[in-house]
Image: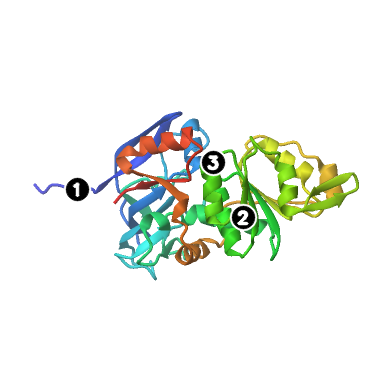
Amino acid sequence: MTSAPSVPTTRQVRVHSPGTVSVDRVDVASCGPRDALVEVHACGICGSDLTYIRLGGLAGPGGEPMPLGHEFAGVVMQVGAEVDGVIPGQRVVVHPGNDASGRIGGGSAAGGLADVVLVRDAATGGRLIAVPDDMPMDVAALTEPLAVGMHAAEQADVGPGDNVAVFGCGPIGLAAIAALADRGLSGIVAVDLSAERRRLAELLGASASIDPSQTKVWRELERLHGTRSLAYGHAPATDAFIEASGSDAVLTGIIDRAGPGARISVVALHYQPVPVNFLGVLMKELTIRGSMEYPARFADAVDLLARRDLSALITHRFPLDRVDAALALLGDSRECGKVMVTVS
């Protein structure tokens, strides 16, 4: 009697119920003709991962445990017959996908906080993007959050010489600052309560930073950016704002205090409705844009990582078997940048 061939397994971080997450041993799905198997080397932890843990799943507990991790890079192990342009042994960053292809770490059966990930529909262009041989894998894993920050900067519609204020200097706010600096802007002001994040913001390209617990933010913006006249007073000559804090009070404050013609890019998640002074929006002709993910920005993010040293975004690293400590750090502390999990 011949025994059945063994099925390869992988460690995988999964959410089982609200507040319950563990490193499980699961089977690796077989690689189809349009798929690829990737050995994960590094995966960042996102604030959305903490939300999934709090909820017990994508929007609450589901029928199966939910795998985590969508910011990851690794090495291609195997490709299907229909996958072109990628070969085994190639170093890649993985686009986590969309609803049609199955979002890795976003409700599908795959997650980047694992040893091995099956990338469905890898034959579709842009799912696997090659990274330079000299780029560290943890830096390559910054591609996804950097692409989010780049899109937020793009939605702010900035031009040469514009003054910009970035509220909230978590990884996405810091990524937006790096993207703005790469565009050559010099009037970037970072606003955050955390001394460490303000330090990182200035390291990545902010010309100044403000601690809102110690300084009157709007008065300081007027000092740094100058002023513009309003019919009823004056406002900072800040051309664009990026709201990356997730604070309702910050968002309404920006709308109330921004000057004429200012653009506001909202990249933070606001889970509850926020009251908006639309009379002020009308009279000051403000432009408010949402910034969702990273349309066509993944390859650009890899290029930016190759051109500029943005490794300072990573402040903490943990092995996969200490993912609980990594999650606890991100949940309890604001004195950190990107928390990275190293796997292989």
Three-letter residue code for mark 3:
Ala
Three-letter residue code for mark 1:
Ser
Element carrying mark 2: loop
In the picture, residue 24 is in which quadrant?
Answer: top left
| Real-space CA distance between mark 1 and mark 2, rounded to the nearest whole angstrom | 57 Å
Circle 1 or circle 3, nearest the eye: 3
The residue furthest bottom is: 85
Three-letter residue code for mark 2:
Ser
Residue for badge 3 = 195
Element carrying mark 1: loop
- Picture coordinates of residue 60, whole percent (x, y): 50, 32
- Number of the label disc, if any, that sits on residue 145: none
| Real-space CA distance between mark 1 and mark 3, rounded to the nearest whole angstrom | 52 Å
Q: Are marks 1 and 3 in contact (CB under 8 Å)?
A: no
Q: Residue at horizontal 49%, vertical 39%? A: 335
Q: Are marks 2 and 3 in contact (CB under 8 Å)?
A: no
Residue for badge 1 = 6
Residue for badge 2 = 207
Circle 1 or circle 2, nearest the eye: 2
Q: Residue at horizontal 61%, vertical 45%? A: 244
Label located before the other in sequence (1 or 3): 1
Q: Where 229 falls versus 48 (above or below)? A: below
